């Protein structure tokens, strides 16, 4: 059974839904700039308008309330609160999030607040190179403190940083997110600074004595070895040390995996960690309350020789099968898992992997877990009746919720599950066609009309049943019934 007061939620992120990118004193973020550079995003899409949530927030909360959502995870845009990243506070930004939080609470929906979902103030990027400078740690902590003080009387759940592993890897190593660098040493440095910003904010939160819980969310893809051969098993081990554990240990143990340290030191790319930094990481790891897990897929690892594959272009087109093999020469490569089905964007669909991953986290960190994201990116279709019968999404979510339940029955302390995403939104590099929402948004004709999908009604029933719904029966009922209703 899921625990009492389980957080049945859905999620979003400021840049992906809000729009209103220059409204009411908001400053520019690195994504506002990046998405305007030709060729950087799929079809030149950007978040200038996105789902226009900034102007339609009340309507969106009404839809959440009508489905009985228990929790809504959203992120605060740093540049609405502090347009230059530091200095004067922009009261209009505070007002917007106050309105949102109050609307949610009025509907008995618990706000789960992410402080950072990738939209660094452009000003800090220009002033000192953003995440590459240690100055970002104090600026971030100051921003976090402003938010804790402004909203902490009503917000009891805080996610400090969303997927530091993804935005640093893609921004500093692969060069496909801002600031577009391809430099491993820069990636390690930026990643280290995210860990310090997280730790310093966790300690600030605790020092303020506010009620509530705090953690950060990491993208976690548990891995399998392609075969039982020693070389493939070795590749799997290296993947964990250089991937999941490198990303989670500093946040949740206050240490760095030795193997990763040795590897990057050999290449002259390691960031020397000072005793004071280590002390801060340790102190925060001792008081952090939960691990946020964004789970989408697993990884299959195989041996990759020194002259093997390196990075490959990502499938951002939605052409299934177009993702090429990629890897780290001399360590490991990602290969297709023939046992699994894949999405059109070549993400492995693997509910069992979630259960397996949760068991691994329990063993390694022993902390409560919040599934802060899980969902299916998909080409949704509207039928002649105006309905979106997203059965594939229902099946995907149903299987993952079941995996969560199995993990709970095996002793994992799970505090909530957030569907990614509540409404359709902008997928950073994949445009508006890769849809995740429980609520459809008309991006095509640009009316931005909201229409609940079949998955919205499925999730509503799941929440009502406290996660005990027999989804198969429900899928049948809903896909044949009246699903196109607009609230
Ligand atoms: C997570 C992010 O990486 O995955 C979200 O936190 C993102 O912001 C989601 O949208 C899905 O990824 P994508 O690339 O398909 O949009």
Image (cartoon, rainbow, N blue to C red):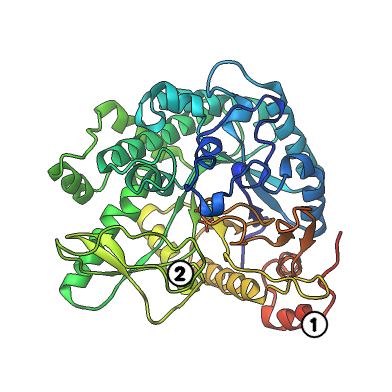
**Can residue 370 be seen at all in this image of the molecule?**
no
Disc 1 residue crowd, few under 14, some 14–19, many 20+, Cα 10 Å: few
Give the side of residue 285 with respect to residue 44, left or right.
Answer: left
Q: Residue furthest top?
A: 88
Q: Is residue 139 above or below residue 198?
A: above
Q: Which residue is mark 1?
A: 480
Which residue shows up at 85% across the image and 62% down it? Answer: 486
- For residue 137, what is the image quadrant? top left
Which residue shows up at 60% across the image and 69% down it? Answer: 397
Identify the mark nearer the N-term, 2 or 1: 2
Out of 49 and 461, give the one closest to the viewer.
49
Which residue shows up at 16% across the image and 42% down it? Answer: 265
Q: Which residue is mark 2?
A: 346
Q: Is residue 361 above or below residue 467?
A: above
Give the side of residue 426 with respect to residue 40, left or right.
Answer: right
Q: Position of residue 92 (x, y in %)?
A: 72, 25
Task: Give the Cα separation between the discs numbered 2 and 1.
Answer: 29 Å
Give the side of residue 254 with respect to residue 44, left or right.
Answer: left
Q: Position of residue 307 (x, y in %)?
A: 15, 62
């Amino acid at each position: 059974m899921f625990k009492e007061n389980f957080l049945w939620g859905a999620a979003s992120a400021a840049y992906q839904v809000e729009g209103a990118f220059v409204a009411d004193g908001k400053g520019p973020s690195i994504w506002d700039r990046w998405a305007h550079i030709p060729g950087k995003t799929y079809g030149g899409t950007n978040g200038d308008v996105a789902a226009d949530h900034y102007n339609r927030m009340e309507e969106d909360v009404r839809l959440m309330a009508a489905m009985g959502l228990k929790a809504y995870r959203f992120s605060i845009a740093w540049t609405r609160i502090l347009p230059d990243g530091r200095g004067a506070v922009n009261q209009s930004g505070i007002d917007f999030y106050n309105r949102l939080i109050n609307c949610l609470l009025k509907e008995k929906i618990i706000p789960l607040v992410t402080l950072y979902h990738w939209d660094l103030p452009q000003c800090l990027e220009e002033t000192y190179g953003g995440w590459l400078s240690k100055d970002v740690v104090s600026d971030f902590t100051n921003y976090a403190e402003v938010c804790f003080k402004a909203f902490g009387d009503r917000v009891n759940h805080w996610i400090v940083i969303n997927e530091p592993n993804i935005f640093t890897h893609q921004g500093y190593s692969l060069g496909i997110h801002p600031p577009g660098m391809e430099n491993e040493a820069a990636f390690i440095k930026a990643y280290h600074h995210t860990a310090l910003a997280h730790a310093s904010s966790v300690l600030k939160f605790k020092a303020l004595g506010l009620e509530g819980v705090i953690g950060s969310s990491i993208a976690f893809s548990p891995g399998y070895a392609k075969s039982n051969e020693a070389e493939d098993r070795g590749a799997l081990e290296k993947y964990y040390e250089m991937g999941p554990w490198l990303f989670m240990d500093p946040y949740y143990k206050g240490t760095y995996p030795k193997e990763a340290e040795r590897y990057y030191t050999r290449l002259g790319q390691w960031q020397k960690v000072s005793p004071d930094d280590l002390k801060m990481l340790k102190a925060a790891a001792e008081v952090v309350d939960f691990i946020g897990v964004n789970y989408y897929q697993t990884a299959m690892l195989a041996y990759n020789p020194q002259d093997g594959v390196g990075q490959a272009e990502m499938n951002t087109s939605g052409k299934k099968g177009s993702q090429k093999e990629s890897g780290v020469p001399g360590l490991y490569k990602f290969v297709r898992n023939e046992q699994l089905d894949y999405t059109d964007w070549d993400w492995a669909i693997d509910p069992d992997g979630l259960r397996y991953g949760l068991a691994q986290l329990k063993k390694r960190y022993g902390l409560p877990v919040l599934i802060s994201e899980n969902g299916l990116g998909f080409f949704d279709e509207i039928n002649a009746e105006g309905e979106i019968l997203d059965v594939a999404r229902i099946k995907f979510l149903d299987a993952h919720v079941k995996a969560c339940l199995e993990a709970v029955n095996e002793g994992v302390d799970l505090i909530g599950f957030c569907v990614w995403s509540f409404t359709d939104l902008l997928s950073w590099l994949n445009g508006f066609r890769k849809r995740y929402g429980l609520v459809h948004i008309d991006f095509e004709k640009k009316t931005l009309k909201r229409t609940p999908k079949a998955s919205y009604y499925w999730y509503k029933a799941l929440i009502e049943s406290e996660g005990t719904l027999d989804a198969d029966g429900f899928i049948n009922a809903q896909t044949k019934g009246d699903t196109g209703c607009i609230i």
